[in-house]
Amino acid sequence: MSNRILTISREFGSGGRTIGKEIAKQLGIPCYDSELIDKIAVQSGFARDYVREKDKRRAAYHRFYTDRKWGDAKNYQVCLDSGVLGIDRCVQILRMLY
């Protein structure tokens, strides 16, 4: 099986972090959230706050390089409304698609 990456873009209060951690747990795969920023800071030698600030600029870079707006539903393969579906159902759907 080839390497797969499941990326969850989320809005504040959506439960996206909880969904991501639960999917990773159920599938037995690593979940990188703020831990990734810490790892990048350690490996690069840059301060954590510097790396975090650069991370916030990804949306601007994304638009510059792809001419697509970050967060626009039409730019994603799957969009789920966790407020309607609930956390458990989102996990179930994404796990099935993985």
Image: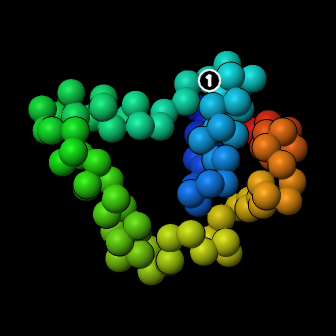
- Residue drawn 67% across the image and 72% down it: 73
- Residue at 63% of width from left, 31% of height from top? 21
Mark 1 = which residue?
A: 29
Q: In the picture provided, is 95 more to the left or to the right than 72?
A: right
Q: Is residue 79 left or right of residue 71?
A: right
**In which quadrant is the N terminus drawn?**
top right
Compared with 63, 36 (above or below) is: above
Of the residues shown, which amino acid type is indicated by label 1? Ile
Give the answer, above or below, for where 28 lies relative to 82: above
Say which quarter of the image contains residue 35: top left
Dividing the picture into quadrants, the one containing residue 37 is top left
Vertical placement of residue 3 versus 81, above or below: above
Residue 23 visible (yes or no): yes
Task: Name the residue rendered at 34%, 68% in the picture.
Answer: 61
Quadrant, the C terminus: top right
Question: Residue 40: image x %, image y %?
Answer: 27, 35
- Mark 1: give few (<14), some (14-19) or many (20+) Cα within 10 Å: few
Most foreground residue, 32 or 85: 85
Which of 8 and 65 lies nearest the eye of the viewer?
8
Q: Residue shown at 41%/75% (left/top)?
A: 63
Query: Residue 6's x, y, as percent?
Result: 62, 42
Say how the picture is coloured: rainbow
Secondary structure of the residue carrying tag 1 is: loop
Q: Quadrant of residue 41?
A: top left
- Furthest-bottom residue in this view: 67
Q: Is residue 12 above or below residue 40?
A: below
Q: Residue furthest front?
A: 13
Name the spot of residue 17 as percent of width and height, x first.
60, 41
Viewer-nearest residue: 53 or 74:
53
